[in-house]
Amino acid sequence: RTRMAARLLPATTEQAKTVLKTLPFWAVHLACLAVFWIEFRWSFVALCLALYFSRMFFVTAGYHRYFSHRAFKTSRAFQFLLAYASMSSALKGVLWWTPHHRHLHRYAATDQDLHSPGLRGFWWSHVGWILSNRYNRTEVEQIRDFYKFPELRWLNRWFLVPPLTLAVALFLAGGWGWLVWGFFVSTVLLWHGSFLVNSLAHVFGRRRYPTPDDSRNSFLMALLTLGEGWHNNHHHYMASARQGFFWWEIDVTYYLLKLLAWCGLVWELREPPPHVLAEETS
């Protein structure tokens, strides 16, 4: 019995750590139920959607296209703003998020793919992997390019500062209604909107390019994620700041990046070259 207990103890301890770690995640979901105890106002819904789409832009432009793929360039000051605004989504630090995403592309559809729905199932690819204790460490060796900035290291260490600052500001500005709708409901929608790119964008949609993974393009998902739904395009040519490769593929993040480029805040937006676009499957 002693030997069996000794073997089971590490697993039990690991499970307990995982449960404790996920409590804040589920607590934010439960907090959304407070909408039933708050007087309904359409202005709260508008605030929720505004914060969903504005933060979705920073997730897609910041976490993904800038930090993970370096698809454009910017100043050090605007780089910090991108990081801070991205992290208001409560998706951990940019120095944590970026190497895990780079790992995903390097090992897509292999045994080392962290969240392939085809290999590990829908739930794991959608949210299980980010709640797991297996991937807590910031993979410094895969993000030397940005790890050299002390302000990003500070943000990565204190990754709860941006979302907590947003939550407090909303409460002070508009009370419980703004906090519940503007932060809790908006954040839960933002989380699952972002997670769908890992899960559903590998299950439903059309494949234009014969990539080794099972990535797909989806118009609906592109609308929900401001352009990330053109996922097969992205896996075909990851370095592009534009993921809607053709004019009919709506990519709001790219349009906003073009606007920022006209303002001089970002520059050298990378786009897919003609020969990459021509590699369609028939």
Image: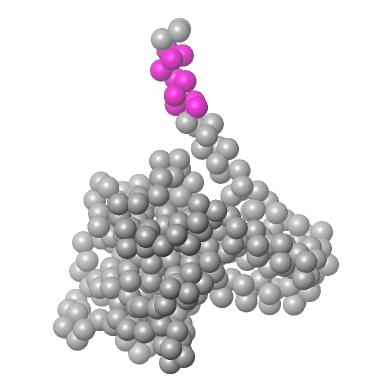
Residue at the bottom extreme, as displayed: 262
User: Residue 237's spot in the image, x, y percent?
Assistant: 25, 73
- On whether residue 194 falls in the magenta region, the answer is no
Whether residue 82 is visible, yes or no, is no
Tell me the colour scheme of the image. Answer: one colour
Q: Quadrant of residue 233?
A: bottom left
- On whether residue 8 falls in the magenta region, the answer is yes
Q: Nearer the viewer, residue 152 or 282?
A: 152
User: Residue 74's spot in the image, x, y percent?
Assistant: 40, 78
Q: Is residue 115 left or right of residue 19?
A: left
Residue at image position (76%, 57%) is 34
User: Residue 141's spot in the image, x, y percent?
Assistant: 30, 52
Q: Quadrant of residue 229?
A: bottom left
Count of marks overlaid on the render: 0
Whether residue 36 is visible, yes or no, is yes
- Magenta segment main secondary structure: helix
Work out whether 15 lies above or below 58: above
Residue at image position (42%, 57%) is 95
Quarter of the image that includes the C terminus: bottom left
Residue at the top extreme, as displayed: 1
Work out whether 117 lies above or below 265: above
Residue at image position (45%, 8%) is 2
First to last magenta residue range: 4-13
Residue at image position (36%, 78%) is 73
Q: Is residue 259 left or right of residue 71?
A: right
Quarter of the image that includes the N terminus: top left
User: Residue 220's spot in the image, x, y percent?
Assistant: 46, 75
